Amino acid sequence: MTPGAPAIPFRAGAPSSNETPAMTDQAIAKPAVRTRVSASRLGALSHHAAGWLLAAPLALVLAVFLVLPIVMIVIVSFWGATEFSIYPDFQWDNYRFLFGSDVTYRVFLNTFKYAAITWAFTLLIGFTVAYFLAFHVRTLGWQVALFLLCTIPFWTSNIIRMISWIPFLGRNGLANSTLISWGVIDEPLEWLLFSDFSVILAFVHLYTLFMVVPIFNTMMRIDRSLIEAASDAGASGWQTLWHVVIPLTKPGIMIGTIFVVTLVMGDFITVRFMSGSQSANVGRLISNDIGLLQYPSASATAVILLITVLMVIGILLRFVDIRKEL
Amino acid sequence: MDPRPRSFYILAAVFVLFLIFLYGPTLTIAILSFQGPQGGLTFPMRGVSLHWFSDLFEEQAVGDIWGSFRRSFALGLLVMVTTVVVSVMGGLAFRKRFAGSTVLFYLIVTSLVIPSILISLGVGLIFSQVGLKVHWATSGFGAQLTWTLPFGLLIMFAVFNRFDRAYEEAARDLGASPWQTVRHVVLPIIAPSLIGVALFGFTLSYDEFARTLLTAGSYNTLPLEIFGMTTNVTTPVIFALGTLTTVFSFAVIGVFFLVLWLSGRRRARQGTDAGKGMV
């Protein structure tokens, strides 16, 4: 392969047996594609048309169920509400109320706190697990098997996975009774369930695999000869990890970060369930307003939440080109 | 092979702990769902019985869970098929740049990162303002697609990034029409990934909660029903339900992997000897 060519994209994912020939073929095929694309303008138009036709169902779904809802929420955030109904209007009251109340700031701060703590734990655990799988498990078969073992819970119900912490963390749960029988504590710990602790525990439990998957994927593309070169040049294990593996894993870390941060910031159900309705984040603020049929104020909060999330994503995307990483 | 370094054993221990953390709670409720009739939500076990499983079949104990299961299953299949078809078309479209493709790409990313409750709220508001009734098969279906499609498309992007175009060139050189090339060359090659997309489509829909919350209407899907139970059911019957639906999820995942494995074997058997040097 030429040194200038993108070095990575063909390793991980579906492991194909004919990797090397595929790469050379692709390199040869490229110029041919290019001449075809730059054909006539009519050809260019028809190739746009083919793209549009193929993308039409996708565009339609996203227009109706993503763009329109966002537009609708923005519109309704300026509406007024009585106790029973909402009416069209153009007023800033919802926003004024939102920014005038210090509950808002506390709740946003709490949301960031959950996101930051969960991010730190999921990154630490996710990186360690992915590192083990990618660099210490030696055969591809075992790597795939253990990787799948880590991802299977993703395809099961989040609600059930939250519920399943109750017998563990409850007042008479496994954790408390074990600690008491060991003599570590005399009284059951009250903060295990329905607290910030249990909220973050559940977040870490639910979302760590969103870190494991992209980090593992990036690690599998790292050229192993780089690791060897580092050790030949006299780097210790830690130095290799810090100066070679971590920098090369950054794209995966960023993608995992995007997943975890947005999932935690947009969550309302985990916080409600695991805190026993005692803690709040922005999602719960919105869902409470919805419960009270105060759609305009729910919409205003939702708009601010969306802007916040998109700003965070915008910042994170500066560090990684998603399209290149797939 | 070199002897394993000490770090291997430490990391292996961490990995095992992680798996226990991942699966432990689910196993716990699986055990507790076999509580005796007098048992509660935590240990100790007061006898072993199928009492709570049999409760699941009594309407008054748990409400309409079988109806909600049927709805979730039907919706899951609907979302699965749609996700596969739309993702493949979208994946094919994105192989070449077309006017608006960048905007569409960022919409896909937005669809993935947008807080689910916004979709729920927005779709609910639109339906109520237009005067349509929200229903799981219309508004719920669309809202779930905004969650499953980004995953399907990301998989397709990854697949087509690795796709060797020489196969298509060859088909074209042999006189295949564009449709024939897709039907007889591209689709068979990407078929295993489509099984993956289908798995995502079905399971993400089957377990989806937040985006369905305000868009399912008066007939609940299973996750909504289960969440409703958490607020008013205080017996192990909820563990029994949790165990059953997790077993069902595992079965579904198992079926997908079985299909994947079988299709891999069929390919190996039916593959021609082309390129193997046999004349």
Image (cartoon, rainbow, N blue to C red):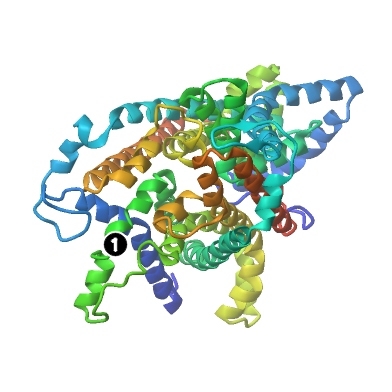
Residue occupying the far right of the picture: A41
Q: Please identify the quarter of the rendering in which residue B184 is found.
A: top right
**Amino acid type of the residue that numbered disc 1 sits on in the rendered structure:** Phe
Residue ID at (77%, 39%): B102
Give the side of residue B44 with respect to residue A52, left or right: left
Residue ID at (76%, 37%): B103
Residue A73 versus residue B47 in the image, above or below: above
Residue A182: image x %, image y %?
A: 22, 79
Residue A97 versus residue B111 in the image, above or below: below
* Disc 1 chain ID: A
Residue A5 versus residue A200 in the image, above or below: above
Residue B112 versus residue A166 in the image, above or below: above
Residue A225: image x %, image y %?
A: 62, 67
Asked whether A211 or B4 is in front, the reply is: A211
Secondary structure beneath dot 1 equals helix
Asked whether B36 or B106 is in front, the reply is: B36
Give the side of residue A174 with respect to residue A25, left or right: left
Residue occupying the far left of the picture: B47
Q: Please identify the quarter of the rendering in which residue B219 is found.
A: top left
Q: Is residue A274 visible?
A: yes
Asked whether B168 or A286 is in front, the reply is: A286
Density class for disc 1 (Cα within 10 Å; few <14, some 14-19, many ≥20) is: many
Q: Badge 1 is on which residue?
A: A168
